[in-house]
Image (tube, rainbow, N blue to C red):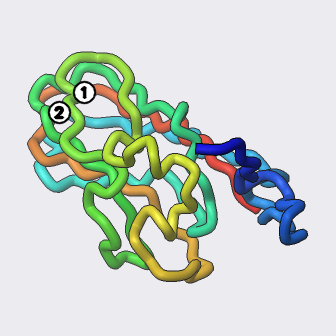
């Protein structure tokens, strides 16, 4: 294999003079910082709305979900809704175990080769719909303890 020159999405391609898209090189960092109080007796399928994220955003894989010990919550999912309609129940994170206090990746279901993709690409759309999605957590078991879940999600938008 010979020597080659390649350009990433955040660099102007000098070979064909195409400009980079702003989200890849000049995007603005944004954050969702949101805490949900989980109460003893919150039932399975309870939903937690953490914030909103635009379809063209790139989620920072260094984002974290902090949580206290929710002893019976061994299955917690993170997904997206649009105007109350489910887009993906667990497309960002599936089956997070929150039984012991700690941190988790809120995008654990996204593989490393998809980290630089925009949200609309991650949810397998053919083009950007220009929407803002709700970031939703779903408890798959009832809670038997009072605790908390804090979302610290960083993303880049154009």
- Label 2 neighbour load within 10 Å: few <14, some 14-19, many 20+: few
* 123 vs 70: above or below: below
Quarter placement of the N terminus:
top right
Measure the alpha-carbon separation of dots 1 and 2.
5 Å
Report the residue at 32% width, 46% height from top. 109
Q: Which mark is residue 40?
A: 2
Q: Residue at x 50, y 70 (%)?
A: 120
The answer to which of 59 and 146 lies nearer the viewer is 59
* Vertical side of 25 occupied by 74: above or below: above
Q: Which residue is mark 1?
A: 146
Q: Position of residue 137 (x, y in %)?
A: 32, 50
> Which residue corresponds to the image point at 35% horizontal and 40% vertical from the top-left?
108
> Mark 1 vs mark 2: which is more N-terminal?
2
Residue 97 in the image: above or below residue 140 = above
Asked whether, in this view, residue 82 is left or right of residue 2, the answer is left
Q: Relative to residue 50, is residue 39 drawn left or right?
A: left
Q: Quadrant of residue 45?
A: bottom left
Q: What percent of the width, then of the height, locates residue 63? A: 52, 34
Q: x, y (%) of residue 138?
A: 25, 52
Image quadrant occupied by the C terminus: bottom right
Q: Secondary structure at mark 1?
A: loop
Q: State the SS at label 2.
A: loop
In the figure, residue 99 lies in which quadrant? top left
Q: How many numbered circles does the render carry?
A: 2
For mark 1, does the 10 Å Cα neighbourhood hold few (<14), some (14 to 19), or many (20 or more) residues?
Answer: some
The residue nearer to you, when weighing 148 against 78, is 78
Residue in view at x 13 percent, y 23 percent:
71
Q: Are marks 1 and 2 in contact (CB under 8 Å)?
A: yes
Please state which of residues 154 and 108 is positioned toward the viewer in this rendering: 108
The percent coordinates of residue 60 (x first, y second) are 58, 41
The numbered disc on residue 98 is none
Q: Where is 130 relative to 146, above or below?
A: below
């Amino acid at each position: 294999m010979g020597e080659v020159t390649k350009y990433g999405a955040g660099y102007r391609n000098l070979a064909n003079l195409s400009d980079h898209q702003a989200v890849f090189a000049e995007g603005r960092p944004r954050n969702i910082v949101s805490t949900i109080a989980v109460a003893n007796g919150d039932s399975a399928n309870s939903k937690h709305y953490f914030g909103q994220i635009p379809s063209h955003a790139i989620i920072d894989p260094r984002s974290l979900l902090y949580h206290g010990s929710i002893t019976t919550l061994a299955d917690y999912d993170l997904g997206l809704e649009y105007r109350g309609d489910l887009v993906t129940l667990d497309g960002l994170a599936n089956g997070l175990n929150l039984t012991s206090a700690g941190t988790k990746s809120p995008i654990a279901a996204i593989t490393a080769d998809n980290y630089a993709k925009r949200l609309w690409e991650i949810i397998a759309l053919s083009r950007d719909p220009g929407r803002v999605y709700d970031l939703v957590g779903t408890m798959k078991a009832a809670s038997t303890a009072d605790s908390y879940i804090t979302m610290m999600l960083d993303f880049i938008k154009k």
